[in-house]
Amino acid sequence: MPSLKIPAPTKPQLKINPDLIEAGNIDLTKRPKVKNPDGSVSTVRTIGIEMDGMHFNIPTVVGNKIVSDKEAINYFKKTKQHLGAYKSQKAAAAAAQRLHNEQAKYYGL
């Protein structure tokens, strides 16, 4: 697979998170709410993947449904839509947890 050619983050983004390679490119204010079997609601349901030496957070909520990890990865490869690219898996996991907490507050979940 060819390189993704990710642009460098801006100085304000680096000040907030020095492990950030690229900020996400998905509008988090317009995420679909998908009901889970246990009655909870998901808006991003993030997984982490490594590609081209970067650690990406990608959603498994695509359209108005939860998709498999494989489908989410294929969707990412096709659209390049992601929730952030990081220097390490640890940084990506911490960012995913922050995003989960922020989305829960934003959507009142």
Image (cartoon, rainbow, N blue to C red):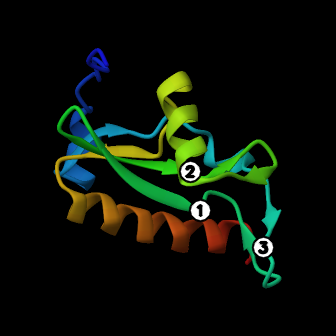
Kindly identify the residue that appears in the image at 57 percent across and 38 percent down: 26
Look at label 3 and name its amino acid. Answer: Asn
The residue carrying pointer 1 sits among few (fewer than 14), some (14 to 19) or many (20 or more) residues within 10 Å by Cα, namely some
Question: What is the quadrant of the N terminus in the image?
Answer: top left
Kindly identify the residue that appears in the image at 60 percent across and 42 percent down.
71
C-alpha separation, residue under disc 2 versus residue under disc 3:
15 Å
Q: Are marks 1 and 2 in contact (CB under 8 Å)?
A: yes
- Provide the residue designation for mark 1: 45
Residue 10: assigned label = none
Give the structural element (helix, strand or loop) at label 1.
Answer: loop
Query: Label 1 amino acid?
Result: Arg
Neighbour class for label 3 at 10 Å: few (<14), some, many (≥20)?
few
Query: Which of these two is toward me, 30 or 12?
Result: 30
Residue beneath label 3, please? 36
Q: Is residue 94 above or below residue 52?
A: below
Q: Nearer the viewer, residue 91 or 55?
A: 55
**In the image, is residue 24 above or below residue 19?**
above
Q: Which residue lies under the disc numbered 2?
A: 59
Q: Is residue 42 left or right of 50 when viewed as pictured?
A: right
Q: Percent x, y for residue 68? A: 62, 53
Name of the residue lying farthest toward the bottom: 38
Looking at marks 1 and 2 on the same chain, the residue that comes earlier in the sequence is marked by 1
Amino acid type shown at disc 2: Pro
**Distance Cα–Cα, label 1 vs label 3:** 10 Å
